Amino acid sequence: RGPLLRVENLTKHYPLGAGLLKKTIPVVRAVEDVSFSVEAGETLCIVGESGCGKSTVARLLMRLVEPTAGRVLIEGTDIAGLKKHALRGFRRRMQMVFQDPYSSLNPRLTAGQIITEPVENFERLKRRRRQALAADLLRKVGLSPEMMHRLPSELSGGQRQRLGIARALALEPSLIIADEAVSALDVSVQAQILNLLMNLQEQMGIAFIFISHDLRVVEHIGHRVAVMYLGRIVELAPCKTLFAKPVHPYTEALLAAAPVPDPTRVRLEAPVKGEVPSPINPPSGCAFHPRCPLAVERCRTEIPPLVPMADGRLVACHVRAPAAEILTEPAAAVT
Ligand code: SF4
Ligand code: MG
């Protein structure tokens, strides 16, 4: 059996505006040649600064936008080739949880209506069946069944995010994409929601793609982590490996910039210097070169490929992942 989800060379360019002079229209290179896979029941985290393309990856996976190039396969089936009906079937297996549960929840519906709505899009439920389903979903996310009569405005931020998760669970998906799902919450509430997600994964075997700008959160929840910079994955590694020793200079800088809760862990370097360049006109070669302390001449002209290292991680860096480190055999089960 192959992976649950496989993403191959996914690319998304957005033309800025449209007109007659097509050749001169600037293009936002939101996602460039991104490949990874997700196994059933695992959590893959995607991290990076805002504008690095991580939300666009999520939207491409959900097919909310069409890719410029590349493929998305679910259990080996290319979802681009699916007709409407089959696509609907596949879609219910992938659900999404958003950053702001308030704006993504209909304020006029009760909690019970909100979380049973995805099921009602497929089949009409009788009142008793709907209530039983709502109670069951609320219990799964640690809310009391009486809450089904409340409106989103009557709930706290953490309760609303639990509601967003309950709605995502309604169709019993095999994969949930959580885009900055805890970023708007207080740190203590964040921990509760992360624990909830981890418990759900353990009980139901759900896979997660957990998108965040916060490495501290990722370390807690992820099995593997993909670091994105300006539309590309620059490092992809098991969480333990990455946090023990980042290899890509950008990962290193991100880790150094994250708050260190453990005082015995030494900060590696100063936080990432400079602004993220615009994806409209990204720097040539390695897009990180204007901010990279290790940049050499080659970095300005050649895009570093993502290559497997001896310890099984993938790194795109001319200096830290040079040709000598490249294995002749493809890395096992990393992508
Ligand atoms: Fe830095 Fe060059 Fe590596 Fe890019 S390829 S991260 S610029 S050393
Ligand atoms: Mg985003």
Image (spheres, rainbow, N blue to C red):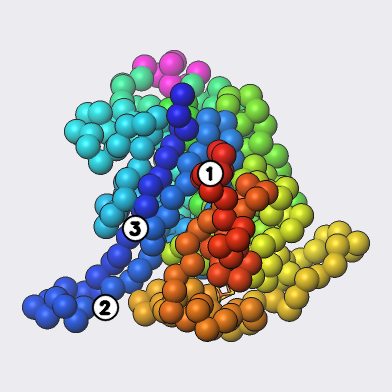
Q: Nearer the viewer, residue 34 or 56?
A: 34
Residue marked by disc 2: 26
Which residues, given as a range, are shown in magenta? 126-132
Between the residue at mark 3 and the residue at mark 1, the CA separation in whole angstroms equals 26 Å
Indicate yes or no whether the magenta region holds residue 127. yes
Relative to 203, does residue 301 appear above or below in the rendering? below
The amino acid on which the numbered mark 2 sits, given as a three-letter code, is Pro
Residue marked by disc 1: 329
Magenta span: helix, strand or loop, mainly?
helix
- How dense is the environment of label 2, judged by Cα within 10 Å: few (below 14), some, or many (20 and up)? some
Residue marked by disc 3: 11
Relative to 8, does residue 249 appear above or below in the rendering? below
Relative to 29, does residue 33 appear above or below in the rendering? above
Q: Are marks 2 and 1 in contact (CB under 8 Å)?
A: no
Which quarter holds ligand 1?
bottom right
Q: Quadrant of residue 171?
A: top left
Indicate yes or no whether the magenta region holds residue 101. no
Point out the tag, 3 or 1, that comes first from the N-terminus: 3
Q: Position of residue 332 (x, y in %)?
A: 57, 39
The amino acid on which the numbered mark 3 sits, given as a three-letter code, is Thr
Q: Position of residue 333 (x, y in %)?
A: 55, 38
Q: Is residue 166 left or right of residue 5?
A: right
Point 53% across, 44% down: residue: 329
Q: Nearer the viewer, mark 2 or mark 3?
A: 3
Between the residue at mark 2 and the residue at mark 1, the CA separation in whole angstroms equals 39 Å
Q: Is residue 140 left or right of residue 164?
A: right
Q: Position of residue 75 (x, y in %)?
A: 40, 30
Relative to 331, does residue 129 appear above or below in the rendering? above
